[in-house]
Amino acid sequence: MNTKPQTVRRTLRQYFSELGLLLDNPLSGFEVYQQRWGDVVPLPIPGLRAFQITHPEQVGVVLKIPHRDQMATKSLKDLLGEGLLTNQEDDWHWRRRIIAKPLGPKAITAFVDDMFRLTESWFARLNPEGREVDVTPELMGLAFDILIHTVFGANIKIDKDSILSLLEQYMREFTLDNTGWRRWLPPFIVTPGRRQRRRAIAGMQDLIRTAIAQRRAAPESDDLLYRLMTARDEEGNSLNDEQLRDELLTMILAGYDTVALMIGYSLWLLARHPAIQQQVHEELKAIIADGPINAETLARLPLLNTVLDESLRLFPPAYIIGREADKDLDLNGFQIKRGDQLLVPLWVVHRDPRWWQAPDAFRPERWLNGETAHLPANAFFPFGGGPRLCVGGHFAKLEGAIILATILRHSRVSDVNDDQLNLLASVTLRPVDGIRLRFHNHSPA
């Protein structure tokens, strides 16, 4: 593919055709734009200067921009307030320093035993052997339980079902507000769906405020909320209740379905590649057998960990990253103005044949045989990059490895049909019809 800038002169028919594609099937739209126009493409969005960026060199420039985009991320601000995901303010760097330490690679190993215990209990309750199961809602429930337990610990009684229900309502209405006809309605027009979105926001914020108040009155412990409440900067400053609320809602929104989707896509890919799945079983048998799963044993499972990486490459839950240009830029010959919206579709970059051999194939071995040793920087970035690199990336990978290892040492999974996944590009990349798999007993002995 030619990386030199092309002159993008759409006919009126092309403009509306490409706009329709973006609204109807964004993933296909991203691919068409790159194939037709190149690596920096003005997007056909009425009234908005927006560009799609797909070359790793320019991707690196975009990821270094500190400002979030207006199109997707900032529209979550009604729920997340000034949390790390949506914050554009001067205190963003300060907040990140406060939050990063409790979520660092060494700090989160303290949660491994609880993650393992909760996953084992979940699998025993699910008891899927010999059954066909839609793993998507089941994994969503598990990842949400782990998140709530990790964040709030055992001292706080929080209504998990209510939070999850409200969050799902919010995400449904967010999708309709940003992909359907409601996208073109002025903000002051309140549809029933927008009213439902506001009620969901108010309900979640009330539940989190109550939880914070309860946690301040509870004894000291090692849950994540306590760590955040007691974290201090060099001058002794800490997060207040409003800041805690925004960061907790950000963790909840970004921290459960991404993990569940990563595991669901990994299982689906393994079900369609039984030889690779058998190799993972053999690795688990050799390293873990029926013993406990912990940080030490997880580090000795290279194939299982590369299955997660390959799943994140092919089906990145955070399938697009956006920034707003904070100054005028030259990107590969295109003059970007301050305030322009810059969108980076991981879906395209992660499948680009210039960087990946057999880009559409599930090949975890590519991460072990030296094939990816010379990847360009920013050809693979499932947790973003630059100053806005996801602070919870290590947490997500650790949790994902525990869940996948626990499932696969008990069961073998097979696909129930040969259909491809029907994907919805919403807040995250979700399977519209779920992921249906059949479970078969697989003893580690």
Image (spheres, helix red, strand yellow):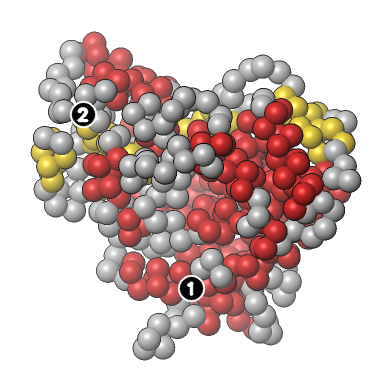
Q: Is residue 272 left or right of residue 100?
A: right
Mark 1 or mark 2: which is in front?
A: 2
Residue 94 image position (x, y, % from top left): 35, 73
- Amino acid type assigned to the residue bearing label 1 in the image: Lys
Query: Between marks 1 and 2, how big is the CA–CA gap?
Result: 40 Å
Would you say 391 lies left or right of 51 here? right
Quadrant (top left, top right, bottom left, bottom right) of the N terminus: top left
Q: Residue furthest front?
A: 369
Whole-percent x, y for residue 102 in the image: 53, 72
Dot 1: what SS?
helix
84 versus 8 height, above or below: below
Q: Secondary structure at mark 2?
A: loop
Residue drawn 75% across the image and 40% down it: 281
- The residue carrying mark 2 is 3
Which residue type carries mark 2?
Answer: Thr
Query: Residue 101 has which mark?
Result: 1
Rendered position, 384 above or below 152: above
In this orientation, does residue 256 appear?
yes
Q: Are marks 1 and 2 in contact (CB under 8 Å)?
A: no
Q: Residues within 10 Å of mark 1 (few under 14, many from 20)?
A: some
Examine the image and state in which quarter residue 352 appears.
top left
Q: Is residue 444 left or right of residue 389?
A: right
Residue 10 x, y percent position in the rendering: 18, 17
Front in this rendered view, residue 254 or 388: 388
Residue pictured at 56% horizontal, 36% vertical: 365
Residue 139 is situated, as x and y percent measured from the top left of the image, at: 69, 44
Lower sequence index among marks 1 and 2: 2
